[in-house]
Amino acid sequence: MTEVIRLATLDDAERLLYVTLRAYEPIRELDIKWPAATANIELVKQNITDFSCYVLEKDGIIIATVTVRTFAEVSDLTCVWWFAVDPDYKGFGYGKKILDWVEEVVIRDQLNQPAVGLGTSPKHPWLVSMYERRGYKRIFETNHGDGQIGVFMKKNLLPEYKDNQTEKQEDVRAAN
């Protein structure tokens, strides 16, 4: 059994669409309007080409994915997004494995970032608490203007990191 974490290529787009739509089915059912929840092949390809989209393969089959990007309008932090695990492989630690790897190897070690951010929905019954168990802390909430509330979370990747980074939360709040 071989496991590999690597950058996605355009050749992976169809499988990534399949994994993402299956993983985000509960998000659609909760009427949370995230781009990944209703992605199409063009959006998946754009995610692959515009950002750093990582996949975890098991025996040559993509079973998990997470993307690294920034949201300059929200925070100075490098963020993770479009995190998905094929439902057939949930509960085996593959999500933890790819998130740990991206946080530690990519964001902390390669990009030299002391912290990572992400956005999620407080409307989801367990995502906020899952990220809190992973060490993320709530920083601020945003109102997207369409009835959708988001919560921005941050995790320090270096124990000695003093939180000197200023979030652009006041700007975001003022805009909403």
Image: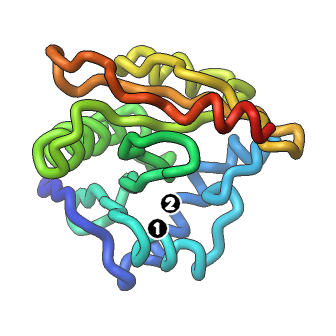
Quarter of the image where the C terminus is located: top right
**Displayed quadrant of residue 22:** bottom right
Nearer to me, 93 or 156: 156
Q: Position of residue 31 (x, y in %)?
A: 82, 43
Q: Position of residue 165 (x, y in %)?
A: 36, 28
Can residue 65 be seen here? The reply is no
For label 2, the crowd category at 10 Å Cα-Cα, with few meaning under 14, some 14 to 19 and many 20 or more, is many
Contact between labelled residues 1 and 2, with CB atoms less than 8 Å apart:
yes
Q: Is 34 rendered above or below residue 115?
A: below
* Count of numbered tags: 2
For this rendering, which residue is in front, 54 or 59?
Answer: 54
Q: Position of residue 106 (x, y in %)?
A: 19, 49
* Residue located at (32% from left, 78% from top): 9
Q: Amino acid at mark 2?
A: Val
Location of residue 97 (image quadrant): top left
* 69 and 30: which is toward the camera: 69
Answer few, some or many: residues within 10 Å of disc 1's Cα (few below 14, many 20 plus, some between 14 and 19): many
What residue is shown at x 29% (from left), y 23% (from top)?
156
From the top left corner, tell me how far across and down residue 27 is, in percent. 70, 43
Q: Which residue is mark 2?
A: 19
- Type of amino acid at the residue the image marks with label 1: Leu
Q: Which mark, by number, is residue 88?
A: none
Q: Residue 6 vs residue 62: left or right?
A: left
Q: Quarter of the image containing the N terminus?
A: bottom left
Q: Which residue is mark 1?
A: 16
* Residue at disc 1, secondary structure: helix
Side (left or right) of 14 relative to 100: right
